[in-house]
Image (spheres, rainbow, N blue to C red):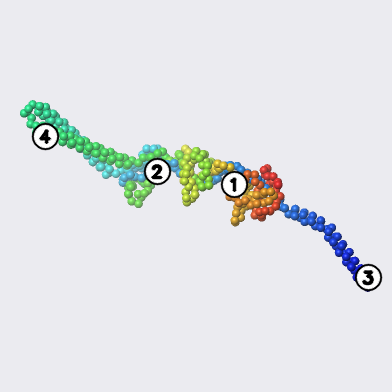
């Protein structure tokens, strides 16, 4: 009876020792498997280098063609249209007679002014004759007064006063003649307004009256309607509202290309001539004018060209592939790989240049970023970097 417990104790001890032995032999295998599994979980990320260069791209902006000069021709005085020699589309030369107006009261006023001038001239001539006569009499009396008792002193003084009076009347007559000439000149100039002439070489683009119409500064509801509108189209202005972010680097004299829907397969060009140097607070754009030569008249005012606006940076900026930029509701960032660890770098994007996009942020030229930006690659993740295909600047870490 006492041997059975002893044998049981020996069997139990042997079993425990065998289990301990088996456990210690299997530990290295388990550790190696765990290590291999851990090594296999490190993701491989394709990276590309951040490059630095000066931006030089073109963006498409809308514009508007306007005549280089445009004049709305209004009548200066109330009158009737007697004759009109141009119509919409007529080419005119500077000084060419376009409209002849008639105003009978102007002719009457000119006749009256001429009559007044003639009267003033006659009055001046009469005053000159009287002054000459009185002057001669005074000289004779003064000579005779040299002999005592021949001429009374009072007579000499009276004659002297008469000469002075005639001289004053002559001066007044001369002033009256001058005023009459000015009045006649004024009426003549007003009469000249009855002939409406072209202010410059151009084309009549609008005609609103016909012979017999009453026109003038205050001739009723049509008082604000011009007789004609003349535009210079041999030279045009292309007005381009340039967004605020594109105004840097603009220079006068730069050549800019554009196209218009009327000639979709042709490219026209203009020269930057006038820069407003002021941003419109409502549209956040700066008006810029291009001078466009249009000798054949193919372009027309009012067209809306598509302008290929050049955008330049005075200093180099950073670029990465557009796919490297990740966007979430909270941030725009790239994933930089540094020492095998992923980190997010917040950035602001600029212009797109081909497959690259301009970036502004805490980056340096040569930094490696993930070729495909994604928020799935969390900050602090250990990764294995390899250069992206076609990226000669990338290098694995």
Residue denoted by label 2:
71
Query: What numbered label is drawn on residue 3?
Result: 3
Residue 362 image point, x, y percent: 60, 48
**CB under 8 Å between callouts 3 and 2?**
no
Q: Residue at x 39, y 37 (%)?
A: 94
Q: CA distance from mark 3 to mark 4?
A: 188 Å
Query: Which badge, 3 or 4, comes first in the chain's sequence?
Result: 3
> Is 328 situated above or below 174?
below
Residue at numbered disc 4: 158
Which residue sits furthest left?
A: 149
- Residue at image position (46%, 44%) is 276
In the picture provided, is 23 more to the left or to the right than 55? right
Instruction: Give the SS element for disc 3.
Output: helix
What kind of element bears circle 4?
helix
Sequence-wise, which precedes: disc 3 or disc 1? 3
Q: Quadrant of residue 171?
A: top left
Q: CA distance from mark 3 to mark 2?
A: 134 Å
């Amino acid at each position: 009876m006492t041997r059975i417990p002893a044998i049981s104790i020996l069997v139990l001890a042997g079993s425990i020792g065998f289990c301990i032995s088996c456990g210690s032999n299997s530990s290295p295998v388990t550790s190696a498997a765990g290590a291999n599994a851990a090594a296999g979980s490190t993701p491989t990320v394709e990276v590309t280098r951040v490059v630095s260069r000066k931006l030089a791209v073109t963006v498409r902006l809308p514009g508007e063609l306007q005549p280089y000069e445009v004049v709305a021709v209004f009548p200066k005085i109330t009158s009737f249209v007697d004759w009109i020699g141009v119509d919409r589309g007529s080419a005119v030369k500077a000084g060419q007679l376009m409209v002849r107006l008639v105003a009978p009261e102007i002719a009457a006023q000119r006749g009256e002014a001429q009559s007044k001038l003639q009267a003033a001239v006659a009055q001046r001539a009469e005053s000159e004759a009287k002054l000459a006569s009185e002057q001669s009499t005074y000289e004779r009396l003064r000579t005779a007064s040299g002999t005592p008792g021949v001429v009374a002193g009072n007579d000499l003084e009276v004659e002297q006063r008469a000469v002075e009076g005639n001289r004053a009347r002559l001066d007044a007559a001369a002033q009256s003649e001058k005023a009459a000439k000015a009045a006649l000149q004024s009426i003549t100039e007003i009469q000249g307004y009855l002939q409406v002439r072209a202010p410059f070489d151009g084309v009549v683009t609008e005609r609103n009256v016909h012979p017999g119409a009453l026109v003038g500064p205050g001739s009723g509801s049509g008082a604000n309607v011009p007789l004609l509108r003349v535009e210079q189209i041999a030279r045009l202005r292309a007005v381009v509202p340039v967004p605020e972010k594109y105004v840097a680097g603009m220079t006068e004299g730069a050549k800019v290309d554009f196209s218009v829907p009327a000639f979709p397969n042709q490219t026209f060009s203009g020269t930057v001539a006038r820069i407003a140097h002021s941003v419109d607070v409502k549209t956040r754009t700066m008006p810029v004018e291009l001078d466009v030569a249009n000798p054949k008249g193919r372009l027309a005012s009012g067209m809306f060209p598509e302008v290929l606006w050049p955008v330049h940076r005075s200093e180099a900026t950073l670029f990465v592939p557009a796919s490297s930029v990740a966007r979430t509701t909270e941030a725009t960032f790239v994933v930089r790989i540094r020492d095998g660890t992923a980190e997010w770098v917040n950035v602001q994007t600029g212009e797109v240049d081909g497959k690259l996009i301009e970036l502004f942020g805490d980056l340096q030229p040569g930094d490696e970023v993930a070729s495909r930006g994604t928020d799935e690659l969390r900050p602090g993740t250990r990764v294995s970097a390899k250069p992206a295909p076609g990226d000669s600047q990338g290098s694995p870490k």
